[in-house]
Image: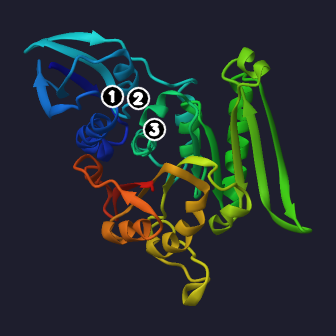
Amino acid sequence: MSRYGFLVSPSHNRVYARSAPDLAMAELRAFGETVIDGGVHDVAVTEIGGVPYVTFTAEPLSDTAVRLLSNLSSLYALFAVEQPDVLRPVVKKPLDLFSSDLLTIQKYAGKTNEDFTRLLVNVTALATDTPGGLLTGRLRLFDPMCGRGTTLNQAVMYGMDASGLDIDPKDFDAYSAFFRTWLKNSRLKHHAETGTVRRNKATLGRRLQVSLGASKELYREGSTIDVTVVNADTLASGDFFRRGEFDLIVTDAPYGVQHGSRPHGGGNAGRLSRSPVDLLAAAVPVWEPLLRPGGAIGISWNTLVAGRDQLAGILAGHGFTVRDSEAYRGFVHRVDQAINRDVIVARKD
């Protein structure tokens, strides 16, 4: 066995920075459960030369293992620990195809921390029946409550096809304007168009469709990354996307603080709900057919307004197996006094 350690990326968010080491250890354990031969062991925060590192032991890391671990959301620099205080740098090989400004340039109230979004995408991808698919860039991601596209941007950074849907027209317009501007400023070859989706003479919603190439050569070859964003109700997702179209569903559920959710049907129709439970109970049956068998769903939510067992029951009731190991129970962390965020991940049977 060999010993390794990594520095945790600094965060501008001081509250998130306090949680980052614990989140990094949980995410590392999820990688160890799924894609690191022999797993990871002895995961801890260890002080080396007066600086805290997340350390672990594992079989000597293969090139594939290094490529996978390079994408840990909080990994800043990776080292082999060859003696108690002697570190040998291990060259990172992250998946990132584009400049980090794709993830960081947008600033708005309620934006999810970019490191956390990467973590959520990572651990959901690791829960599929092909966790190594994270390296291929061929996974297809759907965010059914995408807001201004933080999760979509992370998927694009990884080279994934990304689709999103959100009911707020202002968010749709803001993301469309941002993404088009970013493509232009980045001088990436692309085709983008916005139009209205109609069926049987009825207007269903608006849609942004983009095809872009990570390079001019790839664009000319037709090897594109496709992004689709729809302005419509998440309960109408099946009107816009095909059965089994996605490998991943990744979303940040309403926290019931800055905004609530409006589930449809029954006695709650039209009333603002402070709990995501009502929304997810109505939405999961709509989302489930869009996910291929063996695909995975990852949801973050506020534990102060909904319990883990409630969400697990909804997912289990629609053919999902919830990941319940130590790693997947290690993501709870404080955002502010009104939000205690956690993650639930499940695979479609």
Mark 3 or 2, closer to the camera: 3
Whether residues under marks 1 and 2 lie with C-beta atoms below 8 angstroms apart, the answer is yes
Please state if 78 lies on the left or on the right of 348 as rendered: left
The residue at the point 18 percent across, 28 percent down is 56
The residue furthest bottom is: 267
Looking at the image, is 275 positioned above or below residue 152?
A: below
Question: Looking at the image, which is closer to me, 222 or 211?
Answer: 222
Q: Which x, y percent locates residue 70? A: 38, 24
Where is mark 1, residue-wise?
A: 75
Q: Residues within 10 Å of mark 1 (few under 14, many from 20)?
A: many
Q: Residues within 10 Å of mark 3 (few under 14, many from 20)?
A: some
What is the spatial separation of the Cα atoms under label 3 and label 1, in whole angstroms?
23 Å
Which dot marks residue 130?
Answer: 3
Looking at the image, is 133 positioned above or below residue 244?
A: above
The answer to whether residue 167 is visible is no
Q: Which x, y percent locates residue 101? A: 56, 30
Name the amino acid type tagged 3: Thr
Name the amino acid type tagged 1: Leu
The residue at the point 59 percent across, 30 percent down is 159
The answer to whether residue 271 is visible is yes
Closer to the chain start, of discs 3 and 1, is 1
Question: Looking at the image, which is closer to me, 170 or 117?
Answer: 117
The residue at the point 24 percent across, 16 percent down is 79
Name the amino acid type tagged 2: Asn
Q: Secondary structure at mark 2?
A: loop
Q: Secondary structure at mark 1?
A: strand
What is the spatial separation of the Cα atoms under label 3 and label 2, in whole angstroms?
17 Å
Where is mark 2, residue-wise?
A: 71
